[in-house]
Amino acid sequence: MRRAPLPVPLLRAPVAGVALLALFLLPATLLEAASVREKDAVCSFCAQPFQGLEIVAEDFAVGPPDPDLFVRPLNGAPREFFTVWTCPSCYYSALAVEFATPLTAEEKAAVAPQIKELKWLRPEGMAEKPESQIRIPGWFKHKAMYLCAKARGVPSFVLGNILLRGAWTARVTHDTMDRDPKLAQMYKEIAANFVARHAADLAPKPAAGNGAGVAPDSGAHDLVPEQGFAVYRLLLTHGRLVLKDLEKGEFTEEEKPVAWFMAGYFLREGGEHREAIGALSQVKSFAKTPARLQEMASSELYLQKVEQEFQEQALAHFAAALEKKEVEDLERTTACTYLIGELNRRLGNAAEAARNFDVVLQDARLTAGEAAKNRTLRAYLSWAKAQRALVAGK
Ligand SMILES: [Zn+2]
């Protein structure tokens, strides 16, 4: 069974960089775009052979990041879907590179109780023994990797980074509309009209510079301060324009539930949990809401909850990393503090967010010239300023 990606001309045209992922599996086209191939692997825990996935082309083109450092690929699926593997037999999960070495007897003993639990966490729709890494949801891989890493006693800073990536994979995972051709057709028309109506607002703004990946093992960042959050802003613009159109009565009664779904979809991609939940909850309130659309709205709400849980846990681990002085260099402590601010903002804790952004903005070491020499630090400073403005007065 292969599901095609959501037929979204709306996304393909102005937001060409946004990955559309089918729930539970990636369509073949996205896989090809991501330049990955299968690779023989052996589980570090149970020693069973399986097929991993490796990225062939390292020149993965990426767009500007979201404010929580998620780097969106310009084509295909985010690299986080391929850099983590899950053993199809026991669900032991780790970074692909870690599978080169079996676990020590001590590590195995530490992970064993967790492995038993993983069986119970298998998501609905995932085969008991998935035939390919593609059939394992990205967010499940990260959840399993987090639990295994925690059992192995990995530091909080790394655990926070794994959870942050889990949130990213949940954010870009979506169910597809193609199982109801009538609904898919209606969506296409609504989207085409929407794009025509708002051509000027939706014109892509060229992004400066080139983004870079953030490796969860090293915690190293290579961020470009000049890069705005162009794609992220465009997603929010989409969501809010749909809401405006709903208010103005641009949609027929039949189209309204689809429009609420669209608004929820974009607001969720833009990380606005509260607004997205509001829009997605409206989908089912119409007498004629198609059953398939109701299912899709439920799946969006579920994935949003998954994302929020990842963010809540990531927040706690980044705070613990600072508390335990696991990270002491300026770049990593700044990263932790900035992320604590941004994750709090996303979770609706405005005061906590403001407090953490202020810590970054008032850090004498940053303002005294370190930032002038280091573009990653400059990026955190400019982003903290931008995000601080969003929570001002809230
Ligand atoms: Zn295994």
Image (cartoon, helix red, strand yellow):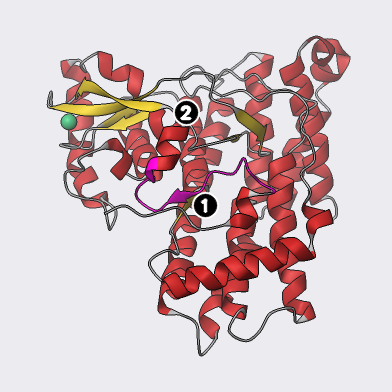
Q: Is residue 26 magenta?
A: yes
Mark 2 element type:
helix
Q: Quadrant of the N terminus?
A: bottom left
Q: How far from the left and from the top, in percent, is residue 94?
A: 32, 27
Mark closer to the chain start, 2 or 1: 2
Q: How far from the left and from the top, in percent, is residue 40?
A: 21, 21
Res 198 label: none
- Residue highlighted by disc 2: 156
What stretch of residues is rendered in magenta? 14-28
Res 308 label: 1
Comparing marks 2 and 1, which lies closer to the viewer?
A: 1
Residue 37 falls left or right of residue 356: left
Q: Quadrant of residue 339?
A: top right
Q: Are marks 2 and 1 in contact (CB under 8 Å)?
A: no
Identify whether 363 is placed above or below 3.
above
Q: How far from the left and from the top, in percent, is residue 363?
A: 80, 23
Q: CA distance from mark 2 to mark 1?
A: 18 Å
Q: How far from the left and from the top, in percent, is residue 249?
A: 75, 82
Q: Main secondary structure of the magenta part?
A: loop
Identify whether 89 is placed above or below 1.
above
